[in-house]
């Protein structure tokens, strides 16, 4: 089997790795909050997302789950599922773009490429 037939699987696996690493970085990187409290006193707080997130780790787990589904679909040669997962990850990245979404632009693009390559591979006749 040629290396090109494994390319969609490798790309989607790289997308999973990127999502996991981006999620870990976002989860543990301190964020500085500055403002003025009710008494007019300037305040500065430094917290991590794990300390401030009302949804817990769900916003960071969702892109990983989407990328894992795409990887499983790429291993089975299902271009429609990979495409849907790529669109979902791109939509997630766009919707959350002002907070954590920018970390997921690259894996969304890589999944789009993997979906395209999976579709090309599925359209080719089977080798004898």
Image: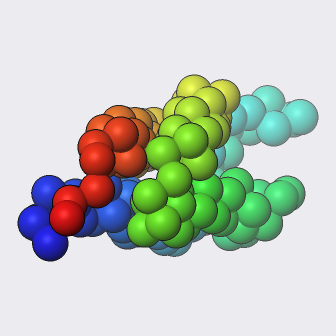
Relative to 36, 124 lies left or right: left
Which colour style is shown?
rainbow
Residue 56: image location, x then y, percent: 78, 66
Residue displayed at 10% across by 66% down:
2
Relative to 56, 75 lies left or right: left
Q: Nearer the viewer, residue 37 or 24?
A: 24
Q: Quadrant of residue 68?
A: bottom right
Quadrant including the N terminus: bottom left
Residue 10: image location, x then y, percent: 27, 65
Residue 122 seen by the camera: yes
Residue displayed at 67% across by 58% down:
62
Which residue is farthest right? 38
Residue 96: image location, x then y, percent: 63, 35
Residue displayed at 44% across by 58% down:
77
114 to 74, vertically: above or below: above
Residue 25 seen by the camera: no
Residue displayed at 67% across by 45% down:
43
Which residue is farthest front? 128
Q: Nearer the viewer, residue 76 or 59?
A: 76
Count how many numbered circles sit on residues in the image. 0
Which residue is farthest left? 2
56 to 31, vertically: above or below: below
Quadrant including the C terminus: bottom left
Q: Nearer the viewer, residue 32 or 74?
A: 74
Q: Nearer the viewer, residue 40 or 102?
A: 102
Residue 42: image location, x then y, percent: 67, 38
């Amino acid at each position: 089997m040629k290396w090109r037939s494994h390319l969609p699987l490798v790309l989607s696996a790289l997308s999973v790795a990127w999502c996991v690493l981006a999620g870990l970085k976002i989860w543990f990187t301190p964020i500085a909050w500055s403002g003025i409290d009710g008494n007019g006193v300037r305040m500065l707080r430094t917290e991590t997302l794990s300390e401030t997130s009302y949804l817990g780790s769900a916003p960071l787990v969702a892109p990983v789950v989407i990328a894992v589904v795409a990887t499983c679909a790429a291993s089975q040669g299902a271009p429609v599922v990979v495409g849907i997962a790529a669109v979902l990850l791109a939509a997630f990245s766009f919707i959350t773009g002002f907070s954590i979404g920018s970390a997921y632009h690259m894996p969304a693009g890589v999944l789009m490429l993997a979906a395209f390559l999976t579709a090309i591979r599925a359209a080719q006749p089977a080798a004898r």
